Amino acid sequence: MKPKLIALNLILAAALGGTAWQARQHWMRAQAERKATLNVAIPAAKPLPAPPVAKPQPPTAVQYADVAEKNLFSVDRNPAIVIDPPKPVEVKKMPALPVVYGTMGLPSGTKAIMAAHPGEASKSVRAGDTIGDFKVIALDSQNITFEWDEKKIERKIEDLIDRSNPRGTPQGPAVTAAAPVSGGGLQPPPPPPQSSGDPVLGIKLTETMLACRPGENSPAGTVQGGYKKVITYSPFGATCRWMKQ
């Protein structure tokens, strides 16, 4: 019995020894592989080439418009040009024409008694003088020409008579002006010449002019028998005559 147990123990001991030896061999191989793995130098990986970068295009002049329109430092910037509307042309209004109180035919030329406005002081005016805003550039017993704002204004004397002034008597009977004499006095006008004339119009003074008949009170501008009635005014009164047309 004992020999069998001894043999069995020997077999078990041999089996354990073989197992231990194999385990040691596995451990040693594992250590050798571990050392071989740790001591091996790993080559560095080469970096991948970078993708090509597109070259930016140079800016064009059209792209600058956004810079002008979207400038953060100038909110009032506006690329649209605003053109101011044309200013209205102011039409200068011509003032009222001067008024006339009479005319005087002198050897040096015709003079007119005028005032810039009704009720103002009057003065003697001849061609070349200025009255108010107007310059007299031509004057005779029937017509007057003014210059204002580089424009010529022609009027008839009778249209400028100040009929609101008591010195003028446009609708009254004809009156002949008295002539001044030395010493400051006045002498009555000379009697009309005793010549034949039109019994309706008046006494003939010249071949083209008749004196008005006393009491005849037709307005100035009346045409009768080929003659036109003309009335002029002066500081001495009104003078009436018929002029042949």
Image (spheres, helix red, strand yellow):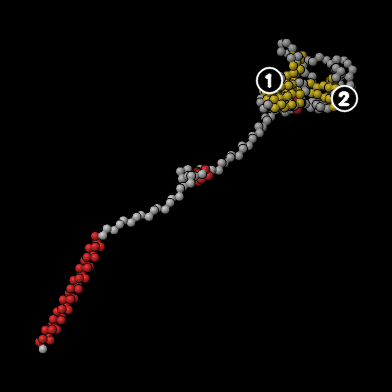
Residue at x 89% of width, y 21% of height = 198
Residue shown at the point (88%, 24%) measured from the top left? 200
Circles 1 and 2: CB atoms closer than 8 Å? no
Q: With 44 as the anchor, is 21 left or right in this view?
A: left
Residue where numbered disc 2 is placed: 226
Rendered image: mark on residue 129: 1
Residue at x 49% of width, y 44% of height: 59
Query: Which disc is residue 95 wearing?
Result: none
Mark 1 or mark 2: whose residue is earlier in sequence: 1
Which amino acid is tagged 2?
Answer: Gly
Residue at the location (71% across, 20% down)? 127
Q: Nearer the viewer, mark 1 or mark 2?
A: 1
The extreme top residue here reads 182
Coordinates of residue 242 in the picture (x, y in percent): 84, 22
How far across and down, in percent of the image, does residue 151 sit? 70, 27
Q: Position of residue 45 (x, y in %)?
A: 33, 56
* Camera-nearest residue between 112 and 177: 112
| Lateral position of residue 103 relative to residue 38, left or right | right
Provide residue 162's location: percent of width, then percent of height.
Answer: 73, 27
Which sits in the foreground, 172 or 234? 234
Mark 1 element type: loop
